[in-house]
Image: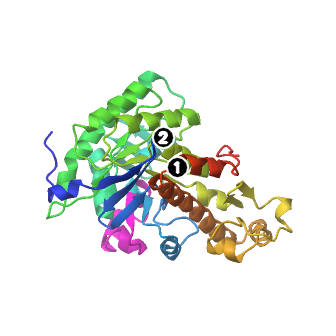
Amino acid sequence: MPPLEMPSSESLKTFSVVAKDGSSQARAGVLRTPRGDVETPVFMSVATQGSVKAMTQEDLRELGARIILANAYHLYLRPGTPVIEKAGGLHGFMNYDGAILTDSGGFQVMSLAKLREITEEGVTFRSHLDGSKHLLTPESVIGIQRRLGSDIWTSLDECLKYPFDEQKATDALERTMRWTERAHASIRRHADSEGKRGMFFPIIQGGTYPALRRRAVEHLATLEYDGISIGGVSVGEPKEKSWEIASLVSSVAPEDKPRYLMGVGTPEDLWDAVSHGVDMMDCVFPTRVARHGMAMTREGRLNLLNAASREDFRPVDPECACRVCKTYSRAYLGHLSRAGEISAMTLLSFHNVYFLMDIASTMRRAIIEGRFDQAKKDFFSKYQRREPDA
């Protein structure tokens, strides 16, 4: 397959590594996007439907969020790509000037299994909104992302829910590779008049099988791409399997390609993922738990619905510099959460996203200064690990 026509050779230099850790696979880098540079490691907040839940774009600017994630499948259904296109693309529709990565909808292949049918052509969905029928193909998903005007495009993939056997994993991988080739071929047709297009981060599968993951990475060598999206994690597998996958991909992937681990984003996950060579992560976790009165702290997760917070007038995290911790007490935020006040969700979401972005910044500084291992030990000397659903 011939390579994509690019505006210039410079456009290929989209990622560079600025420092590596000597005792792990951790690294610090810079991702160059059409909307500006993004320093890595980076945690990306999830704006599935064009909004990070309970947060505004003003919040994102205050946090310094230079990249977020939106979902092409959901935005295609509502409000629809024509509406967003008329608004000048997703950036104009949202009034957000940072980079936007769009997920292809492959995760919905798994999560909406009762509403879809997979064939070689693509995935036929019954909309979860009104039951209408839609066909998503590798080509149409690229077209949707072009119309949305996102900066980073992903490919349609077949994602399996753990557990599954090696044959099912092989079948899903091979279909994903065929779909990736079709998506790659369609990008030329969706480039603008100057040949410019979104950065291409194809999604790889392969389950928990090392040989299949290696095969998936090797397959990308036949294509022109800007980064690797590691799919098929956080789908029910044990955490140690997730890190085995991340470590393997990091060891065989080209150094000049960023590695994006999809759907990972607890505080402990960030440290572990970066230790295994991951550059980019996203997750709904910080805003989801905020809606249930949960806050992230340097000592672990804090449930503000517990009775212990009723007369606790300390900040959520005394070491945190965010405006929520500077202004409000645990007692007050717990009260708002118990009372069902919307402000509890907005305030705790802001703090939780700040907390994860601060971890990413801390890791980056530690890698550059050659003290990543010590920084990780310092963090976990206080932080109590827990399972995501605890």
Q: Residue 173, position in %: x, y?
A: 37, 32
- Residue 161 appears in the rendering: no
Task: Determine the residue positioned at 30% across, 47% down.
Answer: 256
Side (left or right) of 1 relative to 350: left
Q: Residues within 10 Å of mark 1 (few under 14, many from 20)?
A: many
- Mark 1 or mark 2: name the one nearer the start of the chain: 2
Of residues 253 and 178, the one nearer the viewer is 253
Amino acid found under the numbered disc labelled 2: Ser
Q: Is residue 42 above or below residue 316?
A: above
Q: Which mark is residue 59?
A: none
Circles 1 and 2: CB distance less than 8 Å? Answer: yes
Q: What SS does tag 1 mark?
A: helix
Of residues 367 and 162, the one nearer the viewer is 367
Is 90 magenta? The answer is yes
Label 1 to label 2, Cα distance in Å? 9 Å
Of residues 60 and 46, the one nearer the viewer is 60
Q: What SS does tag 2 mark?
A: loop
Side (left or right) of 206 relative to 13: right
Q: Which mark is residue 24?
A: 2
Determine which quarter of the picture holds residue 195.
bottom left
Q: Residue 314, position in %: x, y?
A: 78, 69
Q: Which residues are magenta?
A: 73-101
For mark 1, what is the residue? 372
Is 226 magenta? The answer is no
Colour theme:
rainbow
Side (left or right) of 270 relative to 139: right
Task: Determine the residue positioned at 47% across, 62% down.
Answer: 49
- Residue 281 appears in the rendering: yes
